[in-house]
Amino acid sequence: MQVDLSYGRGMLPVRLPDDLDVTIVRKPPMPLLPDPVGAVAGALEAPVAARPIVEEARGAASACILVCDITRPAPNGLVLPPLLRALIAAGVEPARIRVLVATGLHRPNVGAELEELIGDPWVLRTVSVENHDARDDAAHVDLGATAAGTPVKIDRRFAGADLKIVTGLVEPHFMAGYSGGRKVMAPGVAHKDTITTFHSARFMAHPRADNCVLDGNPLHREQLEVAGKIGRVLAVNTVIDEQRRLSFVNFGEVVASHRDAVAFVERYAMVPVSRRFRTVVTSAAGYPLDKTYYQTVKGMVAPLEIVEPGGDLIIASECSEGMGSRAYVDAQRRLVGLGPDGFLADIGRKRFADVDEWQTQMQLKATRRARVHLYAPALKPEERALTGVEVVASVEAAVRASVRDSGDRHVAVIPEGPYVVPVHRPGP
C-alpha cells in the first residue's frame, strides 16, 4: 500500500509491503468554515469575554498586532485584512498600527518570506510590519518577575500599545501543551532572559510540559502569569485542518478565547490508538515546520505514547534549511560530544538555558524511548553527524528493517506528524 507523508510543500509517497498490518493515525474529519473571510468578520463581532472589535478599538491611539513567524502556517492573509479594516473603521490611524512578527529567538522574516507570512500585500502597504528581536535589551520593558522567578521583559512596542492583539494558530505543542494565545506573547515577543528562563532544563524536564497538557504544565502557568503582567490583551485564534483550511476562528480576551479554541482542537488533534507499535512512521508536518532539523524534533516527540519502548520511530523531514540556528548546532555538537547523560548534567546546572538547547533536551525524550531513524536527504554529511539519530536513505527500507528485526508486522503511520498526537487507549 502507499501512504503519503506531509513533506516540504507537498507529500512524500511511501510504498509499504502489502503484507503489513498498517494503522493510519490521523485526525477525524474536521468541520470546514464555508466562508472563511465571513467567519473571521463574524468572530470579530461576536467575541469571547470581550466587546466587538470596533468597540474595543474605539478611542485607542495605537494598536499592536502580533503574528506568528514563518514556522507556523497561520492564515494571516485571512485574519489581518478584516482585523485592520475594523481598527481603521474604529478610528485608529493606520500610521499608529503596527504588526509585529513574534519571532521569539528565531531569525527575522524579511523580503519574500515576510510577504508570504503576511499573506496580503495590502497589509504591507497600509501598516508597519516589523520583527521582534529578543536580544535587543533596549527594545523591551521590564515588568518584574513571576512567582517562580522568571524575569518578565516584553517588547515595548507591544507592551506600550493602547490596544494589544495577538493572532495565532492553536495546535498541539510539545512543551507548552498548545500553541497560540499566551504563547504568542511569551516567548513570541519576550526578551531572551524571559525565554531562556522558562525554557531551562527544570521546566523542560517536568512531566506535564508535554503535548496537549495545560493543567499542571509549568510553561503554561508561567505564560499565563506573563500575560497577566502585560495587562488586557485580545486574541484572534484559528484552527486549520490537514489541508490547511480554516476549521475554527474566534476572537476575544486572550485567555478565555484561547481556552475555547483549545476545547475545539483537542477533539481532533488527540487521536486514541488501542495499541503500541514496534514500528512507527511519521513526518515533521511538512512546510513550514520541516524547514529545519530543529523543528523536526516536534515530530519525534508527538507519537511517543504509542511507540513500544525500544521500538523504531521513523521520521521524514525535508530540512530544506539544514539544522537550524548556530546556537542549536552548538547544542547538538555538545550532545554528540558529551553523550545524553553528560548533556543533561551540563544543562541542569543553568538558570538561563543556552539558546535553542531546549530542543536538544526534548530530542532526548524520543531517543531514550525509541531508536529514531531520520529521512532527510537535504542534510549535508557534516549535519547528519550532529543529529544524534540514525540517518536513513529510504523510509521504506527503514520500515522493512524494523519489521524484520522486531518480527512484528504492525506498523503505525502518522502522515501529518506533530499536528496529531496519538493517545494510547488500550482496547479491542
Image (cartoon, rainbow, N blue to C red):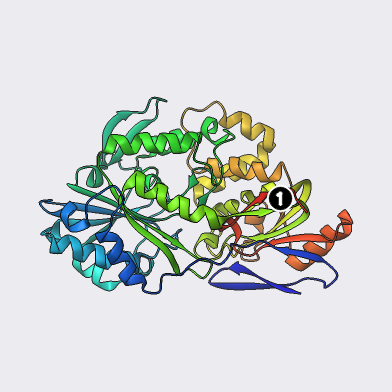
* Residue 277 in the figure: left or right of residue 194: right
Element marked by disc 1 = helix
Seen at 30% across and 61% down, the residue is 43
Percent from the top left, x then y, of residue 95? Answer: 14, 60
Q: How many marks?
A: 1
Work out which quarter of the rendered image holds the C terminus and state it: bottom right
Seen at 82% across and 73% down, the residue is 18
Quadrant of res 89: bottom left
Seen at 78% across and 50% down, the residue is 311
In this view, the residue farthest toward the front is 428
Q: Residues within 10 Å of mark 1 (few under 14, many from 20)?
A: many
Percent from the top left, x then y, of residue 152? Answer: 33, 33
Looking at the image, is 114 positioned above or below residue 55? below
Percent from the top left, x then y, of residue 84? Answer: 22, 63
Q: Nearer the viewer, residue 186 or 356?
A: 186
Percent from the top left, x then y, of residue 156? Answer: 24, 42
Q: Nearer the viewer, residue 43 or 409?
A: 43
For label 1, the residue is 306
* Amino acid found under the numbered disc labelled 1: Ile
